[in-house]
Image: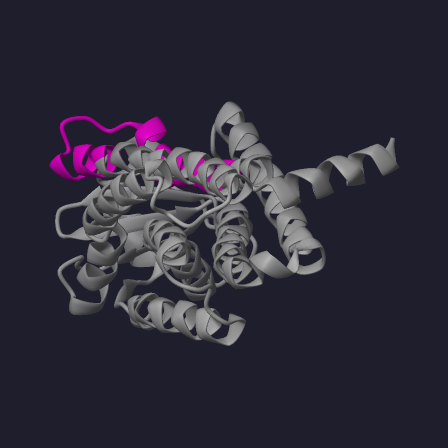
Amino acid sequence: MTAPLIISIIHYLVCTVGTITNLGLIAIIIFRTPRSMRSYSILLFSQTLLQSVTCITSGMVFMRLIPQDMSVFFVMSGHSFSSYRVMYYLYSAMLHGHAHYAIMLAVCFAYRLFVILYPIPRVRIAAAAVTMIYLPTFIIFIWFATSTLYDQATSKQLLARRGPDYVFDENDIVTGVVSFLEPSAITGIFWVIVPCLPAYVIVIEVSRRISRKLSSNSAHLSEKTRASHKEIMKGLVLQACLPAVYLLSSGTYIAGQMNPAHSLNFEFSTHMSGELIAATSPFLTLYFVKPYQRSNITIFNRIN
């Protein structure tokens, strides 16, 4: 069964715009970052690269998520590869980008407070810190990718019992995790959902402390530096609102797991809502980080 036309249009439009914008932001970060922002640019580069991977893999997989009892089935409408195992690897790469987004937001907030209180860290130290923070996510989703899967024939047979909307052709790529309680699977699911909560606690507390410092006359910052911090903080606060969209993803997943009613739209929207986050975030960075905003305007003026 192919995805409804309107859902396909929204999906590919969001993923295409998100991919182009994130890759464009990566180029601006590499070539247009001022010397004073090089350490912070490591954080932005890491976050933007993950968002690029998320948009690209989302577009390739186009996931329809179907919870059923202890299993979770995946219908990959992207048809990028004929192997369900390869498509599941791509799905794992996509999911790890969603999982790490809130973590990197908390890191960006913490960095803004750090540079108000202490000297700007060296680029190598920033890169090492970002790598160490990323490693748990990388390891967890490498493990997640090894979860036990149903083969395509078994997956289609089990789903067909749900009704005509769950009968798939030979060409449809369908698989599923045998049990979401398998350690590799439940750890990955945990890492997508749970870190958002402590990340928000960090974001709220750090935002409060930054606001207090910027308002304090005792903070040894020039007016220009204060204004720069405030502008970047505006963008970060708006970006911090984006993971709230994951509540929609969680809600649609839980609704499917409880199985009160089957909904094709819910099954597609579980991950499509995450695509919106990855596609929207770079626009906020380009607007609120002034050096990148100026570079973006310069590029458009030259094109015109």
Residue in the foreground of this view, choosing between 34 and 287: 34
Q: Is residue 267 magenta?
A: yes
**Residue 159 versus residue 249: which sits nearer the camera?**
249
Q: Residue at x 45, y 74 (%)?
A: 125
* Quadrant of the rendering where the N terminus is positioned: top left
Quadrant placement of the C terminus = top right
Q: Quadrant of residue 137?
A: bottom left
Seen from the viewer's position, the closer of residues 87 and 161 is 87
Q: Which residues are magenta?
A: 251-280
Q: Main secondary structure of the magenta part?
A: helix
Does residue 81 appear in the picture of this structure? no
Res 18 → quadrant: top right
Residue drawn at 37 percent across, 47 percent down: 219
Along the line of sight, the residue nearer the viewer: 124 or 263:
124
- Image location (x, y in percent) of residue 85: 41, 65
Residue found at the very far top of the displayed protein:
6
Q: Is residue 84 left or right of residue 148?
A: right
Res. 283 image quadrant: top right
Which x, y percent locates residue 134? Answer: 37, 67
Q: Residue at x 45, y 37 (%)?
A: 230
Residue 114 among those drawn in magenta: no
Residue 302 location, x and y as percent? Answer: 87, 37
Left or right: where 100 falls relative to 191: right
Depicted 233 relative to depicted 134: above or below: above
